[in-house]
Amino acid sequence: MIKKKYKPKSSFFKFLEIKKFKNCKVYFYQGWHDIVIFRIEILKSIEEKLFLKNYLIEKSDGKEKAFIVTKGKAIFKDEKIFKKNLNKYDCLHTNKSIGNFVIKSNKGTQLFIILSKKKMSGIKKVNFFNFEKNLKKVDLWGGKCISRVFHGSKMTLVLFKLKKGFKFHDKGHKNEQITWLIKGKMKFYVKNKKSSLIANKTAVDIGSYDFHGGKSYGAVGFDAFSPKRVEKRYA
């Protein structure tokens, strides 16, 4: 679906709505390195067969992908592979083909799909986990930022919770970093650009080795890195 090429340049952005659908809203953003992120807001109770195809989400066979429920609950199933109930911060991660993917969900559910553009090598399997229940806490920034880190094949995903007043400055890294909030607000800068990150409204895409940082007013959100982070503190 998406063919546009992006330059490795830092920018603030808003997720773009793909199209107006009856049962849900689907938004997307394509990063400059390898990943596309979809945000889906369920407007009415649904049971959708061929969910990815019906909502114009590009073909994902053999590609690494993660589905994260951030609000509400949903039943994810594929007749030949799995059937799982996913609640808040539950994640399905796979590189299997799930063309017959079905979602059954109630009104008010929110989920994100993080999709790698390149096909993933190695054993094809399906992983289910909860960011809070199954991933250990990592103190990346000295006490006021608690992170939980998941490493896929080509991407690293981080759920972070920032206390009010938390400040940080990062000198930069080679990886693309896409950061968005699902709760709260923070001031953010990257190089000479400044803006506010606001839950479900504004986000930021960080270029390779661009310094960045900010101040939290109390916030919960995600980082998606591509390629995955390999530094020891992310282990």
Image: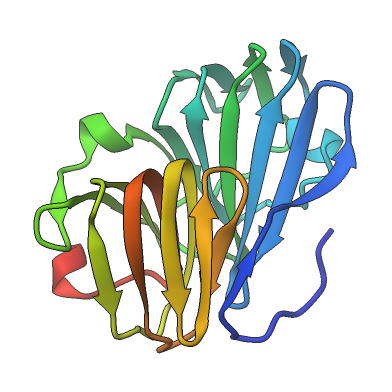
Q: Is residue 98 left or right of residue 182?
A: right
Q: Is residue 145 above or below residue 79?
A: below
In the displayed structure, does residue 145 sit left or right of residue 29? left
**Image location (x, y in percent) of residue 205:** 55, 70
Which image quarter holds the C terminus? bottom left
Q: Is residue 128 above or below residue 180?
A: above
Total numbered badges shown on the rendered structure: 0
Q: Residue at x 60, y 55 (%)?
A: 202
Q: Left or right: where does residue 163 sit relative to residue 10?
A: left
Residue 231 in sight in this render: yes
Q: Is residue 101 visible?
A: no
In the image, residue 174 lies at what x, y percent?
A: 40, 85
Determine the residue positioned at 67% across, 36% down: 40
Is residue 2 or residue 120 the one in the foreground?
2
Question: Which picture quadrant has residue 64?
Answer: bottom right
- In the image, what residue occupies the spot 80% across and 47% down? 17
**Residue 107 sits in quarter:** top right
On screen, residue 80 versus residue 229, left or right, reads right
How is the rendered protein coloured? rainbow
Hey, which residue is sitting farthest left in the picture?
142
* Quadrant including the N terminus: bottom right
Who's the residue at 77% across and 46% down the image? Answer: 57
228 vs 126: above or below: below
Q: Position of residue 66 (x, y in %)?
A: 51, 45
